Amino acid sequence: MPSRLGAIADLTPVTDGEHPVWLTLGEDGTISRWDVATSDHEAVGATAVPTEPGHEPWSDRELRRRLHSSPDGMFAAVVNDYGRFGEVIDLRTGEVTLNLESEGYHSETVPFSLAFGQHLGRCVVIHRTEWNRLDVSDAQTGEPLTARSSPAPTDGVDLPEHHLDYFHGALFVSPDGKRILDDGWIWHPIGVPSVWDLDPWIEGNVWESEDGPSRVEVCDRADYWDHAMTWLDSARVAIGGIGDHDAGMRPGARIFDTSRAGRSGAAVELLAFEGPTGPFFSDGTHLFSCDDTGLSIWDPARGKLLGDIPGFYPTRHHPGARQFLQLTDGVVRLWTSTF
């Protein structure tokens, strides 16, 4: 890494285009734009998200700063994973456009729910505002686009309308930008990844993320969430782990078609195969996984191992540049896929 970038807390790709451009977050809060091909870099913003002293880790999940980028790199968000606070920054002006706060109820169990998207040509940000509620806001103005009243309390016998007993987790936007994958869990604790459509949520049904027609649960696993998952294309997702309970989970991947629901109402499972473990990535065709031996490349339609790169442990993927990145002690290792 260029020495003037300093110690790096996190980095994320600017995915709009094939050029290998990344945003970096320095330990001092500086956000920089880094062109890997030329090594050029410049500071484009800064963050002062609170560190949340006194935070108690849950199940070894330490509070950490996480950097997110809009696809075009014009906006960034810095959040405290497994914490409460964050902010959205317009990198053209350096101004904070939206202060984020996730209410804090069991926030130590999940990464801070946040993802950027596009709607009718404008950049939007999907973010957690309560443990069981997500909202969409305009990234430039901070204007809420899914404003709604919280479900009214009842007499304690029946749940209020639109009530969602769901702790929202990490969010993933589909490659076409149309759908949201949520790695959340329900009490008592069962991981239940779920999917719904972005456009109707903004355009009319503000309850789409709670109980809208497009919302579908992918699968359920007792005591198991915050593990590998990725979109393969606009319909299929790969979910890490074979089994229905953390105690008996086997390394592998399950492939689901989230555009269809089976008899149970959940997404249709297409295939399950053993082998992939660690973080998951996809280029729209292949599934990539990274375990303690290195990076592996899989055919998710057949469950076949296509190749591997021993000793290479990437934590980030630049889809536009088809580039994988490993950062260790200030040194970057890169691999560009030719698959």
Image (cartoon, rainbow, N blue to C red):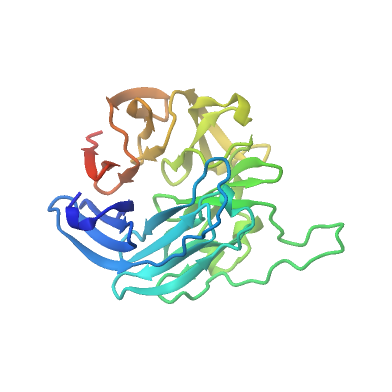
- The number of callouts visible is 0
Q: Which is nearer the eye, 199 or 60? A: 60
Q: Is residue 27 left or right of residue 248?
A: left
Outermost residue, left direction? 38
Q: Residue furthest front?
A: 54
Residue 86: image location, x then y, percent: 47, 63
| Residue 65 position by quadrant | bottom left
On screen, residue 308 above or below 93: above
- Residue 22 spot, x, y in % from top left: 26, 54
The one of 330 and 288 positioned closer to us in this rendering: 330
Relative depth, front residue between 245 and 338: 245
Q: Residue at 32% of width from left, 57% of height from top?
A: 25
Query: Residue 211, located in which quarter of the rendered image?
Result: bottom right
In the shown orientation, is residue 164 left or right of residue 172?
right
Q: Is residue 126 visible?
A: yes
Q: Residue at x 60, y 24 (%)?
A: 248
The x and y percentages for residue 246 are 60, 31
Residue at image point 44% right, 23% down: 275
- Mark yes or no: residue 121 visible: no
Q: In what quadrant of the picture does the C terminus appear?
A: top left
Residue 330, position as x, y percentages in the image: 24, 45
- Where, by quadrant of the figure, is residue 120 drawn? bottom left
Q: Residue at x 38, y 57 (%)?
A: 68
